[in-house]
Image: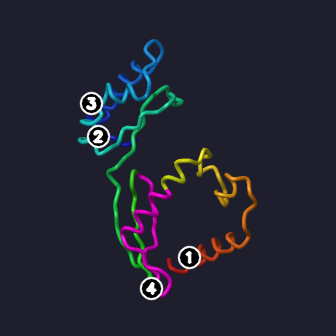
Amino acid sequence: MALKQNDAVVFKGLLSTAKILRGPGVAMSVDGAVAAMAQQVSEFEAISKHRVVFLAEANAAGEFLDIIDLRKDFLRTRKPNDESLVLRTKIQSVPIEVKLVKDGEYSFDNKEVVSALRALADEVDGIEIDLFSLDNSDVRSLISGEDSDPELEQEDEDADADRSSEE
């Protein structure tokens, strides 16, 4: 967490308030704490360019809040070669890459990209396993308990090979 000195002081105050509201004695719900602290959090987020995240449980340091640095978020298109166009972004500090165009194979407009990203968000939201804890996996098969389809795994390997040749 790389906050400016003034922002760090304000965030420390938010941490203290959250600890009082959520800690032993009061034990307010997450939604109650969000509502009670809404104005303070909104002002901090506007000034610091960080998003405040209310945690369901206290972290190892006993804090009920975390922050996401939004200052380095971006949205760009890039042409890694003459045949492709890629959307590269960092949203809420999460890097995302979407292949928009590959000559002769596909071309996706904004509505198609939005629809696919929303479908991805809905699908990931329903997964109880943290994806970062998985190695190479067919996540849908893993969740459903089915065996992976070797043909799909080959398609993934082919896509990985295409990606490395584009860069």
At numbered mark 2, what does the secondary structure look like: helix, strand or loop? helix
Specify the segment rendered in magenta. Answer: 93-120
The answer to whether mark 3 and mark 2 are in CB contact below 8 A is no
Q: Residue at label 4?
A: 83
Between marks 1 and 2 in the image, the one whose residue lies nearer the viewer = 2
Task: Tell me the element at label 3.
Answer: helix
Tell me residue 102's x, y (percent).
47, 81
Q: Is residue 157 above or below residue 91?
A: below
Residue at mark 2: 45
Q: Residue lying farthest right?
A: 147
Mark in the foreground, 1 or 4: 4
**Residue located beneath label 1 in the image:** 164
The amino acid on which the numbered mark 4 sits, given as a three-letter code, is Glu
Query: Which of these two is toward me, 134 or 16?
Result: 134
Mark 1 falls on what kind of element? helix
Q: Residues within 10 Å of mark 2 (few under 14, many from 20)?
A: some
Residue at which label 3 appears: 40
